[in-house]
Image (tube, rainbow, N blue to C red):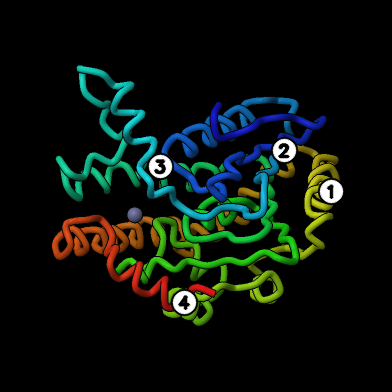
């Protein structure tokens, strides 16, 4: 694996996002490797709890928009052409390609990780931006370092939120709207008050606190843990979580469709740069 590390500490699997030079931005390759890690942990009978963490200053800067993987994957595909869904070939196939790719890599993976029948814990430090939310929100618990900041500024790109609409469920409707409307960052304390994170710990204790919590949970009966998780997730699904995710994913796609139609690119980049330069601090 190039972007991920996988290890176990007794009954705890630790999945580590390891792209600190890119502020842990996620590309298609990153997500495929992360899915491999989650699958491995889910399939390993010795693993009872899964921790997702990242190396470096920031948990995750969001989607890697550099397209670096795209070139690699195209080259690897050779003369036979790329496998469908292996990269976003939107220039050839338009919104259909975006919809297909994001169904697999964003909504699909996040939804699958959310339903792994083992407790998952995300440890978040520094910035957790847009696509980063789609990594920590599907986890059952979130431990935040006291410097953690959560944001989804994609309204600056003409899009109404990232592909996995956890916002309303995680924050409640008013805070969700504020987060989306203003693109501002929610700090760890505010996230804890909203019920979005379980606990806030000093940055230098983040890993130790997360592992202690994981080991504590790992003492419980694995079937009871799976059933507890299922009980909460199914309750949310009956309230509409699962259907809402799909519905809002489709709303997200109309954002890409609009950007393509007016700017010829899946996001409104000019708007993004303008707003970013105004708000950089
Ligand atoms: Zn998208």
Q: Which residue is located at x 70 percent, y 43 percent? A: 51
Q: Which residue is mark 1?
A: 208
Q: Which residue is mark 3?
A: 105
Packing grade of label 1 (10 A; few <14, some 14-19, many >=20) is: few
**Could you give the CA–CA distance between mark 1 and mark 3, rounded to whole angstroms?**
30 Å
Earlier in the chain: of badge 4 and badge 1, it is 1
Mark number displayed over residue 279: 4
Decide: marks 1, 2 in contact (CB < 8 A)?
no
Mark number displayed over residue 223: 2
Decide: marks 1, 3 in contact (CB < 8 A)?
no
Q: What percent of the width, then of the height, locates residue 146?
A: 75, 66
178 shown above or below 171: below
Closest to the camera, between mark 4 and mark 1, is 4
Q: Is residue 143 left or right of residue 19?
A: right
Q: What percent of the width, then of the height, locates residue 172?
A: 54, 75
Determine whether the residue tagged by mark 4 lies in a helix, strand or loop: helix
């Amino acid at each position: 694996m190039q972007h991920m590390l996988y290890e176990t500490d007794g009954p705890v699997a630790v999945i580590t996002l390891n792209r600190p030079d890119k502020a842990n931005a996620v590309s298609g390759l990153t997500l495929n490797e992360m899915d491999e890690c989650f699958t491995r942990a889910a399939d390993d009978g010795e693993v009872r709890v899964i921790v997702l963490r990242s190396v470096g200053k920031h948990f995750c800067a969001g989607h890697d928009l550099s397209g670096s993987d795209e070139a690699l994957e195209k080259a690897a595909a050779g003369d036979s052409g790329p496998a469908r869904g292996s990269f976003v070939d939107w220039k050839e196939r338009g919104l259909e390609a975006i919809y297909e790719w994001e169904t697999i890599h964003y909504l699909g993976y996040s939804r699958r990780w959310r339903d792994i029948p083992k407790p998952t814990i995300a440890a978040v430090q520094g910035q957790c931006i847009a696509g980063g939310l789609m990594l920590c929100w599907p986890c059952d618990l979130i431990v935040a370092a006291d410097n953690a900041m959560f944001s989804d500024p994609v309204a600056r790109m003409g899009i109404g939120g990232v592909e996995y609409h956890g916002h309303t469920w995680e924050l409640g409707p008013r805070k969700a709207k504020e987060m989306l409307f203003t693109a501002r960052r929610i700090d760890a304390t505010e996230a804890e008050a909203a019920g979005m994170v379980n606990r806030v710990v000093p940055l230098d204790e983040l890993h130790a606190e997360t592992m202690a919590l994981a080991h504590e949970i790992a003492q419980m009966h694995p079937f009871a843990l799976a059933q507890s998780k299922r009980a909460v997730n199914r309750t949310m699904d009956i309230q509409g979580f699962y259907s809402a995710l799909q519905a809002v994913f489709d709303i997200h796609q109309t954002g890409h469709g609009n950007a393509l139609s007016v700017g010829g690119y899946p996001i409104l980049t000019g708007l993004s740069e303008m707003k970013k330069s105004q708000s950089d601090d």
